[in-house]
Amino acid sequence: MCGVDPASSSSSTLLAQDAIIDHEPIKIKSASVPGRRRRRMRPLYKVLWIWLGLLLAVFSVAQWVKHGRSSQVVAAGQAGNAESISKLDESQLWLEDVLPQCRETLATFLCSVNTAQRLPLVLPHPQIAQRMERHYADNELAQADPETLVLKASTRLALPEGDGVLTQWQTPEGAVFDAAFRKADQRWVLDWNHFVRYSDLSWPLFVAGSGKDIAEFRLLARPRLASVDDPRNGIGVVLSAPMSNQMREAGFSQSMLGLSTLEKSGLMLEQAFDQQAAGIALFGATFRDINPEGMIRVCVRIQRTGENGGFQFRIQEVLACHWYDSQASGLD
């Protein structure tokens, strides 16, 4: 501080100390001390900032993962609900696309005057021309003005042979009927066998003894009370002709001999009545057929035995529990 070598004698040191007593104290700058502290603290600050950065990164990643999982759960729930909705929307859009073609086919068919005009409008079948000729020889074409028909309902049918369309129509007089359509040769055509409920013979005439003893029919069926002649644990039915102008009423009826539920036909009838009671529509339809209460549609092969005045009738085979031109039975 005084400029004297500190290694000199003690007296010199005392003189030096006395020399500065009257002087103003010298303020020693300590600028170098904080510098050293900062140099020592910098590594700590770096570690602290890195540590905070890592915490922030971990927190951000955790939030991102949590948000991602929540989004997946929400998306999965939405997907489950959306899947059923999308199927309905898809079917609705599909129907909107094909219904105008079906309406045009039905209108043209109702305006036709002979078999030649009707054949291109119906689902092909090896015997369709002969069937139409035979049917219209005894039955007139249902009279209805296509312009006045109102479409009451429509649904998509998932048939094994391909998708179909089932429609329900109402006339100005209030009569209701249904018509099914299938695609053939890139056109939507009428399922004629379903439309006219085609049978080999007139049901009342067959019951009266006319024609061959075995024939196929599209009829309505309802269960009847068991009789002493029925098999044990069997099922008995009454078959009725459908009414062309009143679908909720049954026509001429005849009781059949009972069938064992161990037989295929008996089991099919039992299951069909169970489905009807449970309100199950066939082939994925959104509504059931228009039938009289408690009755189902069947396509059956009937055998007639006995002589005049003593006929008995037995279901030889239940071919299907519907009237569509399809090989499917309509049961699971």
Image (cartoon, helix red, strand yellow):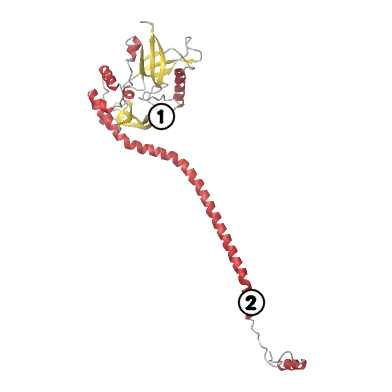
Q: Is residue 144 visible?
A: no
Which kind of residue does numbered mark 2 sit on?
Answer: Arg
Residue 85 quadrant? top left
Q: Position of residue 99 (x, y in %)?
A: 31, 34
For the question of whether residue 194 can be seen, the reply is: yes
Residue 178 lies, in percent from the top left, at 33, 27
- Quarter in which the N terminus is drawn: bottom right
Which mark lies nearer to you, 1 or 2? Answer: 2
- Horizontal arrangement in the rendering, residue 115 relative to residue 259 (left or right): left
Which quadrant would residue 187 be assigned to in this image?
top left
* Residue 257 in the image: above or below residue 88: above
Q: Secondary structure at mark 1?
A: helix
Q: Can you give x and y, in whole percent of width and height, for residue 141 in the image? A: 26, 22
1 or 2: tag closer to the N-terminus: 2
- Can you identify the residue that label 2 sits on? 36
**Residue type, numbered disc 1:** Phe
57 or 88: nearer the viewer: 57
Question: What residue does disc 1 label?
Answer: 283
Q: CA separation, marks 1 and 2?
A: 89 Å
Q: Is there a contact, CB below 8 Å, between mark 1 and mark 2?
A: no
